[in-house]
Amino acid sequence: MPGVKIHATARYVPQRAITNDEISNWVDTSDEWILQRTGISRRHMSDGENTSDLCIQVANKLLAKAGLAADDIDLILVTTVTPDYLSPSVSCIVQSAIGATNAFAMDLNAACTGFVYGLSVAHKYLASGMCRRVMLIGAEVLTKYIDWTDRNTCILFGDGAGGVILSADANRQYAEKLHSRGAMPITVSHQQVINPLCEGDREMDYIKVDGREVFEFAVKSVTESISELLKTTEMCVDDLRYIVPHQANRRIVEGISRKMKIDMSKFFINIQNYGNTSSASIPIALSEMMENGLINEGDRILLAGFGGGLTWGSILLEI
Ligand SMILES: CC(C)(COP(=O)(O)OP(=O)(O)OC[C@H]1O[C@@H](n2cnc3c(N)ncnc32)[C@H](O)[C@@H]1OP(=O)(O)O)[C@@H](O)C(=O)NCCC(=O)NCCS
């Protein structure tokens, strides 16, 4: 399959950072427990900024870095489970805000696999010649949907956005395999919550996670997904510069590393600073890796997403 060229990467997180110690003032937990069980030290929390606000910051940075004008973009694709509204889509709000008059715009929901699914869709529009340049952004304000009295979930998630501008490039390698299996261990749904921080009960949409089930699903599905992609492309781990997993829990990555006998240094991890930012985690990682010179032209990387739906999948691409 022809590949894609990444013209620019960018990220944006809300200014406010919440430490584990701060959360331990709200629920029965500790910095030590959170760090040891998840690898998370802090996460960012929006103070009124919505998902589209985060995306607009990323979109403007992307255009500046790529040296492109807004009307050079043919498609704006936003992956999110936390849109501002049911309609209009976040991508349409971004299109209007940056003045991308030639672009069509749509959102895609594949939970924490969102960026991987989004990259797959972007790739098809580019490979078919229907689009010349695609702006792909993964963005979430997950803290809108957190029950701050539930220690099983409130420690895990953070807000943020990351994105890329892509064009087709037949000389770059690209391979993918995506999966779905409808099941409910991770949901964002209507719940009644007894909330001691507020007056009485509250009914709202909250994130609910069966931590242990998701943990086991993640280790198994990502292991299989990486092996499957390496087999189809007839490559081995040494052919990859980095594996960039969705950042949900450091111990999930350690589990994959043990199971596949791949050294931890092969995996990029930045969960300590962001928590789980769902579909934003992989593009935030890519942006940091580019900025720090960890990946360069010609390097092959493997992106591995997994999350609600259930959804999972991997993409191998050449930078
Ligand atoms: C949620 C998660 C961190 C829990 O870690 P774990 O090692 O599996 O912990 P367990 O669920 O086995 O719970 C162990 C104990 O710690 C307790 N515990 C749970 N959260 C806690 C917290 N924040 N602080 C202190 N104790 C906590 C549990 O109540 C349990 O106590 P018990 O043994 O008395 O019942 C882990 O399962 C995980 O990360 N799962 C994936 C979740 C996720 O990322 N979902 C989205 C994926 S895209």
Image (tube, rainbow, N blue to C red):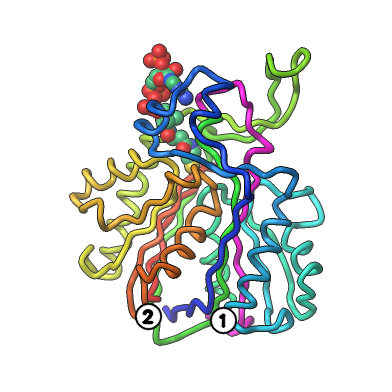
Above or below for 25 versus 50: above
Placement of the N terminus among the 4 image quadrants: bottom left
Q: Is residue 266 visible?
A: yes
Residue holding disc 2: 297
Above or below for 196 versus 310: above
The quarter holding residue 128 reads bottom right
The quarter holding residue 66 reads bottom right
Write the start and end of the magenta stretch as one range: 127-152
- Under circle 2, the secondary element is loop
- Under circle 1, the secondary element is loop
Give yes or no for residue 146 being in the magenta stretch. yes
Q: Is residue 212 visible?
A: no
Give yes or no for residue 129 being in the magenta stretch. yes
Judged left or right of residue 69, residue 152 is left
**How far across and how far down the image is residue 52, in percent?**
73, 56
Residue displayed at 22% across by 44% down: 259
Residue holding disc 1: 128
